[in-house]
Amino acid sequence: MMTLRSKLTPQEIQGFALLLREYRMGLAVERYCTRLLNLYGDKRKFLLLGMRPFIPDQDIGYFEGFLEGIGIREGGILTDSFGRIKKSMSSTSASAVRSYDSWSLHSESGSFNRRIANITHDIEALAGGEEEEEEE
């Protein structure tokens, strides 16, 4: 949260919160990635790396391909916002690696939804707090 707060304006944080909510409500990952890149701009596109933990398994192949396509790649290895190395893979191999049984898929989905809800709440709180500061 601190990274976004230090890199985005209050209006951009509100835009991010809206995009995140739309994605959570069914916006296609392709549109989500494109709109995030438009929001961040070319100079801040590295912020997209921080979104990896919040992209569900069914969308991760496209997301990683999108990152590579916009030049967020170092020697064939992508890193997340915490500097952890994550090898890029095709969406076919990503889906093969991420084959889950129905119980773990349900569990992962619930965990993902909780994390997104918490992040959305935090972002909305940040955006609201900054609006109050501007009014004073």
Image: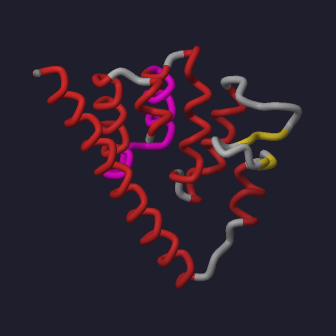
| Residue at image coords 33%, 42% | 123
Query: How far across and how far down the image is residue 75, in percent?
Result: 88, 32
Q: Magenta stretch: residue 25 in it? A: yes
Taking the image as shown, residue 118 lies to the left or right of residue 69, namely left
Task: Pick out the residue farthest to the right.
Answer: 75
Specify the quadrant that holds the C terminus: top left
- Image position of 124 with respect to 106: above or below: above
Residue 13 lies in quadrant: top left
Q: Magenta stretch: residue 71 in it? A: no
Query: How far across and how far down the image is residue 10, in percent?
Result: 30, 25
Nearest the eye: 4 or 135: 135
Specify the quadrant that holds the N terminus: top left
Can the viewer see residue 89 in this picture?
no
| Residue at image coords 73%, 43% | 83
Query: How far across and how far down the image is residue 29, in percent?
Result: 49, 43
- Image position of 98 with respect to 43: above or below: below
Taking the image as shown, residue 131 lies to the left or right of residue 97, namely left
Query: How far across and how far down the image is residue 66, in percent?
Result: 63, 34
* Colouring used for the render: secondary structure
Task: Pick out the residue farthest to the front.
Answer: 136
| Residue at image coords 51%, 52% | 54
Q: Which residues are magenta?
A: 23-38
**Secondary structure mainly formed by the magenta segment:** helix
Can the viewer see residue 5 in this picture?
yes
- Image position of 6 with respect to 97: above or below: above
- Image position of 76 with respect to 55: above or below: above
Taking the image as shown, residue 119 lies to the left or right of residue 70, namely left
